[in-house]
Image: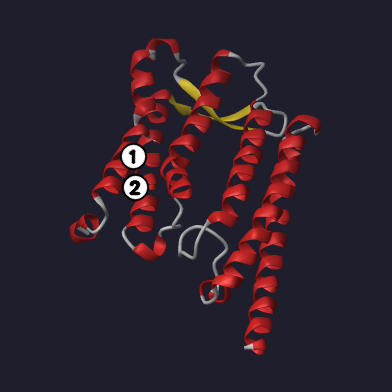
Amino acid sequence: MIRLWHGISLKNRRNILISVISCLLPMGIGLMAWSSFPDQIPIHFNFQGTPDDWMSKAAFFFGFPWFFAGFDLLILFITFQDAKGRPGSPVIESMMMWMIPVIEFITIGGCVFFVFRPEFQIERFLTGSIGLGGLVLGNLLPKARQNTTFGFRNSYTLNSKEVWAKVNRAGGYGMCLISLGTLLGAFLIHPAWATLAVLPFLMIGLMIGLWLYSKTLYHKLHSQA
């Protein structure tokens, strides 16, 4: 493990540590405003945006950050310890460095804001955040070079640069369309959670379509060779 860690460049090791440490920042917020928070923090909401599950503020401010920090370290270590895992784009690599901390801040921030503003429509906030994040990923997908971490990866895309480029470009367009619909649904559909109920089926459909496209394209290119 230590040898693999030293195999990561000094710059990336530094960035990984900064990313992981940033996941622990909510602990400081909890300490500074400890007396302002109730003993129980809402962490789950029903389709009407009403909380239906709570967590002690100790677990919320000191458990959640460590969970996100550990997950962040695992994802970044897997990505950067092997050159084949790197997306090959500085923009995408920077995005991956900050993806987990941003998800954490949105999740914890939304719950904390709801504590002080119960009228806050957290279901629209979280649904809109997912749509916005999908738009970012969709725009970055066509820019990724062949790698084993980021992008649509199967035996066809990983064995042909042309198939990789075309399939991930199509995947980027598809993800942007789905994410745009999710973003609009967050503000136009009531309840907003209904948008998320449809999202998994749309993503599964996109994945199946990309798999079929990659297979067809791969065999077409190789039959012409």
- The image shows residue 136 at horizontal and vertical percentages of 59, 43
Give the answer, above or below, for where 172 lies relative to 133.
below
- The image shows residue 6 at horizontal and vertical percentages of 20, 56
Counting other residues with Cα less than 10 Å from the Cα at mark 1, is it few (<14), some (14-19), or many (20 or more)? Answer: many
Q: With 149 as the anchor, is 201 left or right in this view?
A: right
Give the answer, above or below, for where 145 lies relative to 33.
below
Instruction: Please report the residue visible at 38 percent of the width from the left and 56 percent of the height from the top.
Output: 79
Instruction: Please report the residue visible at 73 percent of the width from the left and 54 percent of the height from the top.
Output: 202
Res 20 → quadrant: top left
Counting other residues with Cα less than 10 Å from the Cα at mark 2, is it few (<14), some (14-19), or many (20 or more)? Answer: some
Q: Are marks 2 and 1 in contact (CB under 8 Å)?
A: yes
- Report the disc number at residue 210: none
- Kind of residue indicated by mark 1: Val
Q: Which image quarter is the C terminus in?
A: bottom right
Give the answer, above or below, for where 65 lies relative to 37.
below
Q: Which residue in the rendered view is the most extreme toward the front?
A: 225
The mark that comes first in sequence, 2 or 1, is 1
- Is residue 200 something one can see in this rendering? no
**How far apart are the two marked residues, 2 and 1, measured between alpha carbons?**
6 Å
Instruction: Please report the residue visible at 69 percent of the width from the left and 83 percent of the height from the top.
Output: 220
Residue on which disc 2 sits: 73
- Is residue 22 something one can see in this rendering? yes
SS for callout 2: helix
- Kind of residue indicated by mark 2: Leu
Residue on which disc 1 sits: 20
Q: Say which of 34 and 86 sits in front.
A: 86
SS for callout 1: helix
Q: Say which of 39 and 200 sits in front.
A: 200
Give the answer, above or below, for where 116 lies relative to 222.
above
Q: Which residue in the rendered view is the most extreme toward the top?
A: 36
